Image (cartoon, grey):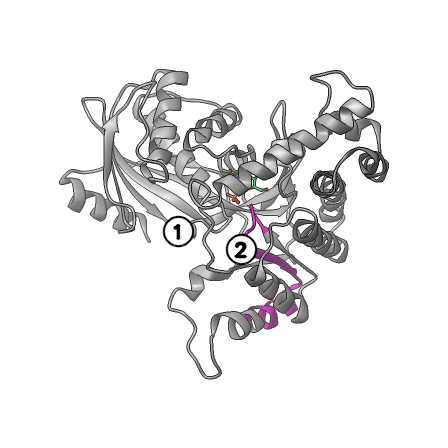
Amino acid sequence: MSSETHLVAFREHFGLEPDRLVRAPGRVNLIGEHVDYAGLPVFPMALEQAVHVAMRPRDDRLVRAASSDPNYPPREFLLGSEIEPFPDGDWGNYLKAAAVAAASRYGADCGADLWIHSEVPVAAGLSSSSALVDAILLALLDISNIEVDPLELATVAADAEQYVGTRGGGMDQAISLCAREGHAALIEFDPLRVTPVPIPGEWRFVIADTGVQVHKSGNARETYNRRRAAVEEAVEQVGAHLGLGEGERTYVRLLAEHEADELVSVAEEVLDDRLLARFRHVVTEAERVRLAEAALREDDLEAFGRLMDASHESLRDDFEVSGPELERLVSLARGAGALGARLTGAGLGGCIVALCAPDQVDSVLEALRIGYFVKQPGGEAPADLHRRLFVAIPSAGASVRRI
Ligand code: NG1
């Protein structure tokens, strides 16, 4: 959708002219899954697909928001540092999450009319929710003439999103706010650091969406929070066994002092099977992120692909967040010559990402189209196929533009 269309839609809805536009991109995580909330590095890139918000300040504290997607009916509320949530699972809570942070952290006090259009597939593991929170946060700050460094804002936005009840990590907000065009980014936490790494011109990341939606403020919240609790419980037990005091039992500390396989051997003595599996995923994934960064810098497609495959196996077997549709897409992509393929995002549904050399892209896209999206021989692919199957373009982070 062009910016002109946003302006027209805003005018039609609110009967006024918008005066600025925000763009906040979704992201695909290349590797480093379910480790951000353990404080460990992750390696995503921002997508071209973004949340766009056309807006205009108001002279009161009302926030009125409408969306181009009829599944998300208009919402309004008063801006303030404490805002009563809408009922559980309501999309408006993402707006309120941003509003509470803008008001309580930065004193934003100017209401706004907001018209939202998202190109990021919803609940598909491409971070549509964080892109929305980031976009609204930027919008409300800009409207109150408050400028904040993107790195600082990323930490604030990650805390803000906890308002919806999912105990997410900080990856999505960091990449959406701080990405550089043509680059992936190594993101480290406590304190947050974002290191852009250029993506070599020959690398192609194909994304395919199962269509199984994973609503982290709804159906998937408990599973996600349970995984995080297990990850935290495991490091407590292993850390205590290794003689670390309370407050020292972190994955970062353990991995600074031990190799992943040593830690797994220790964990085998201490943890029950379920916690052991979750712990093994986290520490081996941390090692894969380190190796993947080196592989990208060395332009070693094959090595990166093997690490993606290993990440997927670990997420499926130890973290138990794959599913039949994700397995089908991963196996089709690999069968058609992808160098690596894995589920991306929280899992349980959502998308896969597959790494290809340029001459494999067409056959991988075709295998996915025929094998997954066209339901029967001679059948038609769904009309929204271009949104569910595409080659990712590494894009820049969020921005505000005056009209
Ligand atoms: P998705 O489901 O891709 O939006 C979630 C978390 C991330 C991270 C990944 C798993 C939120 C906002 N995002 O991402 O922080 O933990 O799962 O690696 O909760």
- Is 162 situated left or right of 73 in this image? right
Split into quadrants, the picture shows ligand 1 in the one at: top right
Residue 245 versus residue 287: which sits nearer the camera? 245
Q: How many marks?
A: 2
Residue 336 rendering spot, x and y as whole percentages: 65, 71
Res 12 visible: yes
Residue, x 34% and y 18% (percent of image)?
81
Q: Is residue 70 above or below residue 325?
A: above
Q: Distance from label 1 to label 2 (Cα)?
A: 15 Å
**Which mark's residue is nearer the viewer, 1 or 2?**
2
Q: Residue at x 16, y 40 (%)?
A: 14
Confirm whether residue 195 shows in the render.
no
Residue 291, image quadrant: top right
Looking at the rendering, the stretch of residues picked out in magenta corresponds to 344-365
Q: What amino acid is labelled 2 in the image? A: Cys
Quarter of the image for residue 305 reads: bottom right
What residue would you read off at disc 1?
119
* Quadrant of residue 363 within the rendered picture: bottom right
Label 1 C-beta lies within 8 Å of the nearest ligand 1 atom: no
Instruction: Tell me the element at label 2.
Output: strand
Task: Give the residue at mark 2.
Answer: 351
Task: Please state the horizontal and vertical placement of residue 119, each as a whole percent of the image.
Answer: 39, 51
Identify which residue, 212 or 2, lies in the foreground: 212
Question: Magenta stretch: residue 210 in it?
Answer: no
**Residue 403 got which mark?**
none
Q: Position of residue 76 (x, y in %)?
A: 23, 33
The residue nearer to you, when weighing 307 against 359, is 307
The amino acid type, in three-letter code, at marker 1 is Glu
Residue placed furthest toward the left: 15
Q: Is residue 333 left or right of residue 15?
A: right
Q: In the image, 135: left or right of 270?
A: left
